[in-house]
Amino acid sequence: QVQFVESGGGLVQPGGSLRLSCAASGFTFRLYGMSWYRQAPGKERELVASITNFGRNTNYADSVAGRFTISRDNAKITVYLQMNSLKPEDTAVYYCMRTGGRTRWNDDWGQGTQVTVSS
C-alpha cells in the first residue's frame, strides 16, 4: 500500500535550519507530484510546498517562500524539504504526500515529523 515515512525533524533555535526527508513507497514515485504539509497545534493542516514529478516546477505557501526549498530524488524515491531561517511560527508536525493524494486517491497520512522552533 501507499506509505510515507517522514524524518529529520527536531528542536532548533530561531534562524536555524533543518532538512526533512520523506521516503515513499507503494506507487511509481516518478509519475506523481509530491507535497509537504504541516499542522500546528490547534490549527488546520496546511500545504507548505509542492513539486512536480520531475522537479521542474515548485510552489510554496507565502509564509515559507524564500526560506524553504522542496526537492526530490526519483532514484531514491525521496522528497526533501530544506528549511532555513526558521521562525517559531514554523513549529508544527510536517507531513508529505502525493500532491492531491487525500482527495484523488485517499492516501493515508504518515506519522509526520515534529519541528519545534524555540530558543
Image (cartoon, helix red, strand yellow):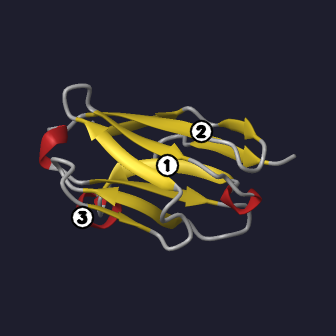
- Decide: is 27 above or below 50: above
Question: Circle 1 is placed at which residue position?
Answer: 95
> Position of 100 compared to 96: left or right?
left
- Label 3 environment density (alpha carbons within 10 Å; few <14, some 14–19, many ≥20): few
Could you say where residue 45 lies in the image, as x and y percent from the top left?
55, 65
Q: Residue drawn 55% across and 43% down? A: 112
Kind of residue sitting beneath label 2: Leu
Foreground label between 2 and 3? 2
Question: Which comes sooner in the sequence, label 1 or label 3?
Answer: 1
Q: Amino acid at mark 3?
A: Arg
**Quadrant of the rendering where the N terminus is positioned:** top left
Q: Nearer the viewer, mark 1 or mark 3?
A: 1
* Element type at mark 1: strand
The numbered dot on residue 104 is 3
Image check: 64 left or right of 9? left
> Dots 2 and 3: beta carbons under 8 Å?
no
The foreground one among 12 and 41 is 12
Q: Check disc 3 and report its element: helix, strand or loop.
A: helix
| Disc 1/disc 2 C-alpha distance (Å) | 14 Å
Q: For residue 18, which numbered disc appears in the image? A: 2
Cα separation between marks 1 and 3: 17 Å
**Quick one: 24 or 54, which is closer to the camera?**
54
Where's residue 87, x and y in %? 71, 57
- Picture quadrant of residue 115: top right
Q: Does residue 108 appear in this view?
A: no
